[in-house]
Image: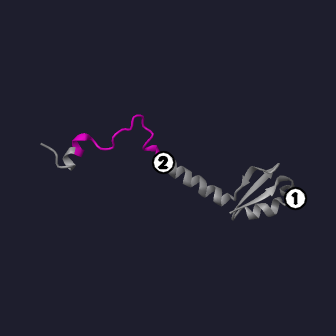
Amino acid sequence: MSQMVPVTEAKARLTGLMRIAQDENVVLMRHGRPACVMVGVDRWDALMEQLDDLEDRLSIYAHDPPEPTVGLDKLVAEMGLAP
């Protein structure tokens, strides 16, 4: 869940919004449009850790063209197709 707050109001409520941001996103609105999001440090750290994990998982597909992870000889032997 997110709380939407106009920037002009956020200036007066900064400390309170910082507390709220520990548990939920606080979206600062400028001219009726989202301008930025306040996120608590613990949640930010957790998001960055998840992003790092996802980047690691995707890195196995980063080769161009993809490199096989098992050699052809081993694959043929494991499938029982060796002559």
Report x, y in % for residue 78: 21, 49
Task: Name which residue lies at 68% across and 58% down.
Answer: 41
Please determine whether, in this image, residue 78 is positioned above or below residue 26. above
Up the image or down, 50 lies above or below 75; here it is below
- Kind of residue at badge 1: Ala
**Quadrant housing the C terminus:** top left
Q: Measure how far apart labels 2 and 1 are at the Cα level.
A: 41 Å
Q: Dot 2: few (<14), some (14–19), or many (≥20) neighbours within 10 Å? A: few
Quarter of the image where the N terminus is located: bottom right
> Where are the magenta residues, as a range?
57-75
Q: Is residue 49 left or right of residue 65?
A: right
Image coordinates for residue 58, horizontal then vertical, percent: 47, 46
Q: Quadrant of residue 68?
A: top left
The residue pinned by badge 1 equals 12
Q: Is residue 70 magenta?
A: yes
Residue furthest to the top: 64
Mark 2 or 1, nearer chain start: 1
**What residue is disc 2 on?**
56
Please state which of residues 80 and 30 is positioned toward the viewer in this rendering. 30
Instruction: State how the image is colored.
Output: one colour
Q: Is residue 62 magenta?
A: yes
